[in-house]
Every structure is written in structure tokens, then in C-alpha cells.
Image (spheres, rainbow, N blue to C red):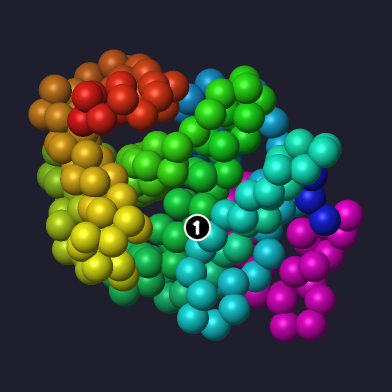
Amino acid sequence: MTAPKQSAAERALEGNGVGLVREIALAGRIQRGLETLYRLDRAADVDAFVTHADEGEREALFVRQSEDGLELLLRLPRLAERTVDVEGAGLDPLCQIIEGVSHFVYLADRASQGREATQLELELQAEVDKYVILAASMRDFDERTSRRIRERLYENIAYLHDAGTELGDRYRVANGCARRFTHRLERDYILRARFSELQGELRRFFHMGQGEKLRAA
């Protein structure tokens, strides 16, 4: 994988990009958290691939195959200035950053193993990773907290793409599968405080292919 020669930190400090330093630091922490949970060897540092999202743009991971391998560029939005909580309006940019880093980690891991990844796989794993990162950020995590996170991520939402379109249907399938999967985690593991087994189940899910993920959900 290749990235622009200029470092992400250098790009962030140019012009009006100073605010992106926070986003790059957060992206790095999210990458470390996901790699620790899923026991992944690092293929690349996400901060070398981050760039700004312009006003009104959302998170996006751009991928291009070249003679040197995959070329990646991760566009991230700015974080809200306010403190973010599960019910907060500032949750959307945070979730976009989690989603972007999730895509990056998943694709980098698959590329390092010579495995393919579908767009639905990427979206489904990202929906689960949002839950994982928000859950890990909670001081006290239990069934009640899990339910709040699930409701906020998978129920109290609006879609940007209409049902019946390719993107609209993909996001709805990913959301529905993640909602059912995390509800099962809550019932089978969180309710009974079986957190070591919960981590094992999340780890198994990450390494599944698309068909296995859909069946697990």
C-alpha cells in the first residue's frame, strides 16, 4: 500500500488544516483498539493516509490498484467541538471516523493476506466496529448501556440513500445484520457478563467472509 509522500501531520498543519490533528490522533487510537481486539498485525499506519473532508462531505476510503499494490486515501470529517455522548448530535462525525478507520483496517488486513473483501463486508464490519468502539469508551458497560448504543446506531437513524438503490440497500442490509448480531451478543454474553467470550465472538466475526458474517447475524 502506498500513500502521499508528505506525512498526514504535515498536511494537517497546512493552511486551515490544523483542526485535523485531533481527527488523525483519534483515527490512530481507533486503529490500535481494533487491531488489539482482533489480534491483527499492522499492515500500515492509518495516519499516513488521512486527508480532509470538505464542508458537506462525508467519510470515504478511496482505493486504487497500481503496480506497487493498493493506493489508499481516507477522507475524514472534522469532529464536533462539543463533548460527544451516545445521544449527542456530535455522534455522527465520530461514527464516520470509526467507519473510515474500520474500512482501512479491514481492507489492509485482507490485502496483507491476499483475501478479497466485498463492499457489503466492509459496511457490515464497520457497523459492528462502531458498536465496539462506543462500548469500549463507556466507563460502565452493561446490558442497559449496550441497548442504548444499539438503539442509537441501528434504530434512531436516517439513510442518505433511498431504498431500492444499490447503496441504499447495502447500507440497510449492513445495518440490519449488525443490529441482530449485536443484540445476540447482548443476550448471550453481555447480560451474563461473559466478556472474554464476547471478545472471542467479535474476533471470529471479524475474520469471517461475507457469507459467514450474514449467517452469523
Percent coordinates x, y for residue 124 in the rendering: 34, 41
Percent coordinates x, y for residue 187 in the rendering: 11, 29
Judge left or right: residue 52 versus residue 153.
right
Confirm whether the magenta stretch covers residue 15: yes
In magenta, the rendered stretch is: 5-28
Q: Residue drawn at (39%, 22%), measured in percent from left and top? A: 208
The answer to whether residue 47 is seen in the rendering is: no
Judge left or right: residue 128 versus residue 40.
left
The answer to whether residue 52 is seen in the rendering is: yes
Viewer-proximal residue, 2 or 94? 2
Looking at the rendered structure, the secondary structure element under dot 1 is: helix
Q: Residue drawn at (21%, 30%), measured in percent from left and top? A: 217
Confirm whether the magenta stretch covers residue 169: no
Q: Residue drawn at (22%, 19%), measured in percent from left and top? A: 194
The quarter of the image holding the N terminus is top right
Residue 85 in the image: above or below residue 144: below
Please state the total of marks drawn on the protein image. 1
The image quadrant of residue 113 is top right
Residue tagged 1: 97
The image quadrant of residue 159 is bottom left
Which amino acid, mark 1? Ile
Viewer-proximal residue, 97 or 214? 214
Percent coordinates x, y for residue 36 in the rendering: 53, 28
Residue 141 in the image: above or below residue 165: above
